[in-house]
Image (cartoon, rainbow, N blue to C red):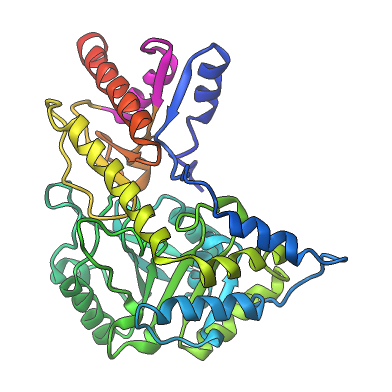
Amino acid sequence: MQASPIRKLVPYANAAKAAGTSVYHLNIGQPDIPTPEGYWNALKKSMPEVLAYGPSQGIPELRRAIATYYSRSGISIDEDDVIITTGGSEAVYFAFMATCDHGDEVICFEPFYTNYNGFASMAGVNLVPVTSSVENGFHLPDTEEIESKITEKTKAILICNPNNPTGTVLSPEELQTLSRIIQKHDLYLLSDEVYRDFVFDGGSHLSILELPGIEDRVIVMDSISKRFSSCGARLGNLISRNKTVLDAVLKLGQARLCPPTLAQYGAAWIYHHLSEDYYDNMLKTYQNRRNVLMEELADVEGIFFLKPEGAFYATIKLPVKDAEKFALWMLTDFQYNGETTMVSPAAGFYATPGLGVDQIRIAYVLSDEKMRKALKILKEGLKVYRDTVE
């Protein structure tokens, strides 16, 4: 398993902090919006005398709440279609294990969330990359290019929509293209939809659960981490209308006994009680931060990226030869008024060697003011680096 490009530079960030330098973290998707207060109240009200094992598939209250959440978007699922997982990470791992045998292949569009590599390694699955391009905002390549990667070992296609690390939102036409490929080649379509509520500029998200004709071929992985600013709760879910898939996933769930019991009561409260105002304010907050990113980097010579359409990430091409060396240098050799910025080198989000070496991923999860400071430091650092190092 590869080291995470999101966390591999953490020791250098810690060393910078120990030396007295403040570090703005744009490397990790950790929201700073407060976890809803009702979550904590629900936990306190649910505290039992004995914190016992829960059902392996999750408590009924949470599974019902998730089904209700989807119904508000016009998506019909039953609580029995939902299995609660220990974070969205486990949902992805379970999806690999349920659809693939050891040595099977899953097609994935690069750059992709780097931990897919780790989950695939754990499951004995080979990720087969199809490269997307920064020049068209990382939208899907032609059907022919996708189909050229399909072999007798291919079992599924994996997407992340809205995308981490690019902020791309797939169009209904792109999803229909994938649906036709799935039907033609008898595959599963796996969709990481953690950021489904993060679509900007009045756009909308189409879930693969809404695609006709492949109802039993789709698996959705989701999480409360980003939507409800609850990363540490470690609660996700897997959704499928395919009973055979669900039976396989439940066996995996039984092997790890149960997801965190107490946290599920808080999550059930959130799904049932948060108003539309919460979602609207959250979306407005991240869209504003996206706009700050665009404003601050718009006039930087040599930087290229298109406006992110959703999530809270951007993959950005820099005018440097090696973005990882630059990111490391920012932590070890540069500070501006006692501060510096930490970003994620993007090469680790690619499976194809040599790609993404001049790119970084930025997570715009800081307040507007902190984002502006962090980006100004990044620009100053980039200028000095180009003048004195490269």
Q: Position of residue 347 (x, y in %)?
A: 33, 40
* 117 relative to 292, above or below: below
Q: Magenta segment: does it hold 386?
A: no
- Name the residue rendered at 36%, 64% in the picture: 196
Which residue of the protein is positioned furthest toward the right in this rendering? Answer: 49
Instruction: Find residue 375 and report its image quarter.
Output: top left
Residue 277 is left or right of residue 180, and the answer is: right
Query: Residue 232: where, in percent of width, then height?
Result: 60, 51
Residue 261: where, in percent of width, then height?
A: 71, 66
Which one is in front, 121 or 344? Answer: 344
Q: Residue at x 33, y 48 (%)?
A: 286
At 35% from the left edge and 40% from the top edge, which residue is drawn?
A: 364
Q: Is residue 335 magenta?
A: yes
Query: Is 254 positioned to the left or the right of 281 in the image?
Result: right
Nearer-the-camera pick, 99 or 332: 332
Regarding residue 119, the answer to whether it shows in the image is: yes
The quadrant the C terminus occupies is: top left
Q: Is residue 6 above or below residue 115?
A: above
Span highlighted in magenta in the image: 322-341
Residue drawn 65% across and 75% down?
58
Give left or right: position of 283 versus 318: right
